[in-house]
Image: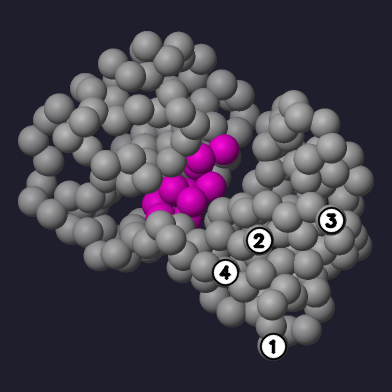
Amino acid sequence: MLLDTVICETEVLASDTKLFRIRPTRGEDWVRAEPGSHIDVNCFGELTRQYSLFDLDEAGYYTIAVKRSKRAGGISEALHTTAVAGTRLRISKPRNRFPLGAPAHAVLLAAGIGITPIYSMQQQLRAYGVGHHLHFFKRDAKLFRDRLAAAISEGAATLYEGMSSEQIRATLYEILDVDHAPNTHVFACGPAGLTLPPSFIQF
């Protein structure tokens, strides 16, 4: 079942990425989501796509980040060019196929728009005082920099900008080829270029 919602706010996160803060038109339709959750977004009655949620502490709202696709006629193109505050959308309730669980320590790997579910995980781990480190590979210097400022200053996040696929792959091996604490979980989300060593599972 899809829920009726309205866009309350939009924000430019990067040259090709926009934030959309969405509120169900009936308050009772909102349920709290867990880190790693996503929603189906139905745009203008025809297009449906899944988007991960972040900023999960905002009670009553769901927040997604949408990267504009080069493919004409897709939902990301419609959202970027047409959707504004007040636009109505239909969405599903949150579902989670990428659960955080209860790691003793976590290594978080993200590339590009793959930061959205990883960011929600980082926020919960930070709130619960669980040891972790976020490694974020990106091309746009603006993307999520402000939101990660506190984690960077605390030494819990590292940003990598403008790296080639080969450089990213080499850096991933360096990150993972060390002795980690017992019960360390590795979470990764990003495009095909974010390839983990064979001994690890890529989500």
Q: Amino acid at mark 2?
A: Asp
* N-terminal-most mark, 1 or 2: 1
Counting from the top left corner in percent of width and height, residue 76 is at 76, 42
How much space separates mark 1 and mark 3, taking CA atoms? 26 Å
Amino acid type assigned to the residue bearing label 1 in the image: Glu
What type is the residue that disc 3 sits on? Glu
The residue that mark 1 highlights is 28
Q: Which residues are magenta?
A: 113-123
Magenta: main secondary structure: helix
Given the image, on which type of amino acid does mark 4 rest?
Pro
Earlier in the chain: of badge 2 and badge 3, it is: 2
Dot 4 surroundings within 10 Å: few (below 14), some, or many (20 or more)?
some
Q: Are marks 2 and 3 in contact (CB under 8 Å)?
A: no
Badge 1 density bin: few <14, some 14–19, many ≥20, Cα 10 Å: few
The quadrant of the picture occupied by the N terminus is: bottom right
For image coordinates 61% across by 68% down, the residue present is: 58
- Pointers 1 and 3 in contact (C-beta within 8 Å): no
What is the C-alpha distance between the residues marked 4 and 2? 8 Å
- The residue lying toward the viewer, choosing from 127 and 60, is 60
Q: Is residue 9 left or right of residue 133?
A: right
| Real-space CA distance between mark 4 and mark 1, rounded to the nearest whole angstrom | 14 Å
Q: Give the SS element for disc 3.
A: loop
The residue under label 2 is: 40
- Local packing at callout 3 (Cα closer than 10 Å; few below 14, some 14-19, many 20+) is few
Membership of 199 in magenta stretch: no
Q: Which of the two marks, 1 or 3, is nearer to us in this view?
A: 3
Tell whether label 3 touches label 4 (CB within 8 Å).
no
Q: Which residue is mark 4?
A: 94
**Residue 107 visible in rendering:** no
Color theme of the render: one colour
Q: Earlier in the sequence, mark 4 or mark 3?
A: 3
User: Which secondary structure, mark 4?
Assistant: loop
